């Protein structure tokens, strides 16, 4: 039995990881929550209520664990990133600094850290892991610099210890258990909610020309499964995305079409948006881990709309 600690288990990404890995009866899952309540899971999931900003609490939590998956974070959507650019900095830096140190001290075998892609430059070409050049756009500066700092600290600890580190630079994740909140959700979840609640018109912020890479949560969970079993490097950064360029306009048109709602799409250029283009080259993950995404955007939208109808009121 491998003991796997999943931090942020009540959040969007953490919940999908917890549910996905708990299906493997060879894993003893330890799920961490803070403010939100626990939910019903498999018998091999044990819950812990912990404030990860407390170093002694982190040490007690991590002791005895084989694998740590650190999905706990302060997250939000583009509205908060524009209006409160500091929101992703302080708590995330503190929490992860404590966790990396504790993993080193407690000789954790494998530490998996979902990072992000906001440190990459805007590009209409598929972005590789080594395309990071230190130039982060102003809107993403706080979140991007924080993630880069944490990636470097993880590499530092990988050089000091036998702990293996996986850094996942994932694209825009969507799927079950997302916030679906117009203020706090990312573009996919917010747009699903807008489409499902709209009667005649769908208002979209910006002109819809921005390129994004959307990955279903099930594909991210499968990536983590592959990394646990197949990663050989002591420290590795992997892109994890669909590898497909989708404009916001294309996304909206597909959602309206699949929802079968007769909506007129209006692009509001006066609303805040982030002028940034990005989709990922994931050949490294395919070559080293044997991973590639299975759920294309059309199927992903169908699955997400179906889940929204059954779970969001």
Image (cartoon, grey):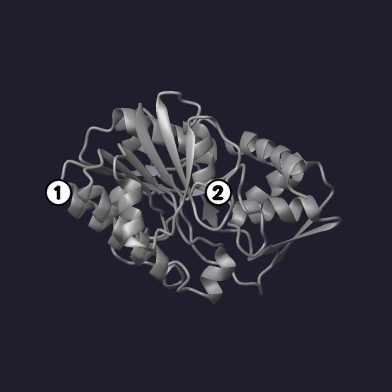
Q: Which residue is drawn at 60% across and 58% down?
A: 185
Q: Which residue: 71% across, 41% down? A: 305
Instruction: State the residue position of label 1.
Output: 159
Looking at the picture, tell me which residue is in the foreground, 115 or 134: 115
Under circle 1, the secondary element is helix
Q: How crowded is mark 2: few (under 14 residues within 10 Å), some or many (20 or more)?
A: many
User: In the picture, which quadrant includes the N terminus?
Assistant: top left
Question: Which one is earlier in the sequence, the residue at label 1 or at label 2?
Answer: 2
- Percent from the top left, x then y, of residue 109? 25, 38
- The answer to which of 210 and 197 lies nearer the viewer is 197
Q: Quadrant of residue 272?
A: bottom right
Question: Residue 75 in the image: x percent, y percent?
Answer: 50, 60
Relative side of 142 to 179, left or right: left
Choose between 127 and 64: the one closer to the eye.
Answer: 64
**Label 1 close to label 2 by CB (< 8 Å):** no
Q: Residue at x 21, y 52 (%)?
A: 155
User: Would you say 248 lies left or right of 70 here?
Assistant: right
Residue name at image x 74 percent, y 48 percent: 312
Against 240, is 51 above or below?
below
Say few, some or many: other residues with alpha carbon within 10 Å of mark 1 (under 14 / 14 to 19 / 20 or more).
few
Spatial separation of the CA atoms under disc 1 and disc 2: 31 Å
Q: Is residue 306 visible?
A: yes
- Observer-nearest of 58 and 89: 58
- Rendering coords of residue 143 (x, y %): 41, 65
Residue at the far top: name it: 25
Where disc 2 sits, the SS reads helix
Disc ID at residue 12: 2
């Amino acid at each position: 039995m491998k003991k796997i600690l999943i931090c942020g288990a009540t959040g969007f990404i953490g919940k999908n990881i917890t549910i996905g890995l708990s299906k493997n009866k060879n894993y003893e899952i330890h799920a961490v929550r803070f403010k939100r309540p626990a939910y019903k899971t498999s018998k091999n999931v044990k819950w812990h209520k912990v404030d990860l900003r407390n170093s002694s609490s982190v040490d007690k939590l991590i002791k005895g664990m084989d694998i740590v998956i650190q999905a706990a974070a302060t997250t939000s959507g583009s509205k908060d990133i524009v209006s409160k650019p500091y929101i992703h900095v302080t708590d995330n830096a503190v929490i992860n600094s404590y966790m990396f140190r504790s993993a080193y001290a407690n000789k954790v075998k494998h530490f998996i850290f979902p990072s992000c892609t906001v440190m990459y430059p805007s590009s209409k070409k598929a972005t590789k892991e080594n395309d990071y050049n230190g130039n982060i756009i102003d809107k993403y500066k706080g979140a991007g610099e924080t993630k880069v700092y944490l990636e470097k600290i993880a590499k530092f600890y990988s050089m000091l210890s036998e702990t293996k580190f996986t850094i996942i630079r994932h694209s825009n994740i969507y799927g079950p258990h997302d916030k679906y909140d117009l203020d706090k959700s990312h573009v996919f979840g917010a747009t699903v909610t807008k489409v499902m609640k709209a009667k005649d018109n769908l208002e979209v912020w910006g002109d819809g020309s921005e390129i994004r890479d959307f990955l279903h949560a099930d594909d991210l969970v499968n990536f983590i499964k592959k990394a646990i079993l197949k990663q050989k490097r002591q420290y590795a950064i992997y892109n994890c995305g669909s590898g497909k360029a989708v404009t916001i306009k294309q996304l909206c048109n597909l959602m309206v079409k699949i929802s079968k709602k007769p909506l007129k799409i209006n692009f509001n250029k006066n609303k805040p948006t982030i002028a940034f283009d990005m989709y990922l080259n994931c050949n490294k993950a395919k070559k080293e881990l044997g991973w590639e995404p299975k759920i294309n955007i059309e199927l992903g939208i169908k699955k997400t709309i179906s889940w929204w109808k059954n779970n969001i009121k």
